[in-house]
């Protein structure tokens, strides 16, 4: 039995050009200092924090809905361009707490890669560019990296009960990193670190 009063129908406005949700109820901001432990070159990150004024890495704009089955959570994610050493700016990445939940990312602007991995070590990447939709299947951790010169903007949607598990990725990382090699983005194995 659906509780019709749980959430009322509503609409939100999205600035597709600039990748912002207008009047979001919740905005998550991750700065360089929030990304300690994630990059291959921690010294380069510290220099960015000290000398680069601790720049914003990414913002996530949300209008939350109840985190119950049947609802859909959605967001606008805006990841800034930049490098930490030779590694492109990226998001922390996460599994969903409820593993049986997928996610859709529709890229609205910019250039990047969506890195995905399973708990058994399978790792792959899909290109992100305006008009490309990336399907993240259930059980796959996901992280995006901005390989372009402008903000990488995506619209994402996923089952509202999914939840976020950041801790496992913080501990284990991804088997591959997105590095600039000879001026071009390349997927490089993290095994040698
Ligand atoms: Fe997710």
Image: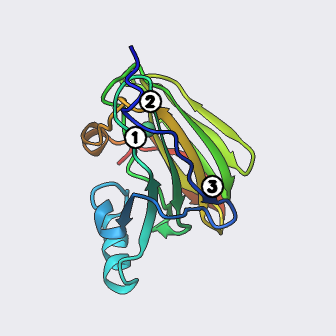
| Mark 1 closeness class: few <14, some 14–19, many ≥20 residues within 10 Å | some
First-in-chain label (3 vs 1): 1
Left or right: 74 in relation to 28: right
Between the C-alphas of marks 3 and 1, the distance is 36 Å
Between residue 54 and residue 21, name the one nearer to us.
Answer: 21
Q: Quadrant of ligand 1?
A: top left
Mark 2 touching mark 1, by CB under 8 A? yes
Between the C-alphas of marks 3 and 2, the distance is 37 Å
Between residue 190 and residue 101, name the one nearer to us.
Answer: 101
Dot in front, 3 or 2:
2
Rendered location of residue 100, percent (x, y): 40, 19
Between the C-alphas of marks 2 and 1, the distance is 7 Å
Question: Where, quadrant-wise, is the N terminus in this rendering?
Answer: top left
Dot in front, 3 or 1:
1
**Which of the labelled discs sits on residue 185, or is there none?**
3
Rendered location of residue 73, percent (x, y): 45, 38
Q: Is mark 3 within 8 Å of ligand 1?
A: no
| Extreme-top residue of the structure | 1
User: Where 11 falls versus 85 (above or below)?
Assistant: above
User: Where 170 falls versus 27 (above or below)?
Assistant: above
| Mark 2 closeness class: few <14, some 14–19, many ≥20 residues within 10 Å | some
Q: Quadrant of residue 45?
A: bottom left
Left or right: 26 in relation to 12: left
Residue designated by label 2: 71
Q: Quadrant of residue 148?
A: bottom right
Residue designated by label 1: 65
Rendered location of residue 193, percent (x, y): 35, 48
């Amino acid at each position: 039995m659906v509780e019709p009063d749980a959430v009322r129908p509503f609409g939100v406005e999205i600035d597709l050009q600039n990748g912002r949700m207008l009047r979001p109820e919740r905005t998550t901001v991750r700065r360089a200092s929030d990304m300690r432990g994630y990059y291959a070159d921690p010294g380069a990150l510290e220099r960015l924090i000290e000398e680069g004024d601790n720049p914003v890495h990414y913002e996530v704009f949300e209008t939350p809905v109840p985190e119950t089955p049947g609802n859909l959570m959605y967001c606008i994610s805006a990841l800034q361009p930049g490098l930490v050493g030779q590694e492109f700016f990226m998001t922390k990445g996460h599994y969903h707490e409820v593993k049986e939940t997928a996610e859709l990312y529709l890229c609205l602007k910019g250039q990047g890669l969506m890195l995905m991995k399973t708990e058994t070590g399978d790792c792959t990447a899909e290109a992100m560019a305006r008009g490309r939709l990336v399907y993240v299947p259930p059980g796959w951790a996901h992280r995006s990296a901005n390989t372009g010169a402008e903000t990488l903007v995506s619209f994402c949607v996923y089952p509202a009960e999914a939840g976020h598990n950041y801790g496992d990725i913080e501990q284990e990382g991804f088997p591959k990193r997105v590095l600039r090699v000879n001026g071009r983005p390349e997927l490089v194995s993290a095994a040698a670190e």
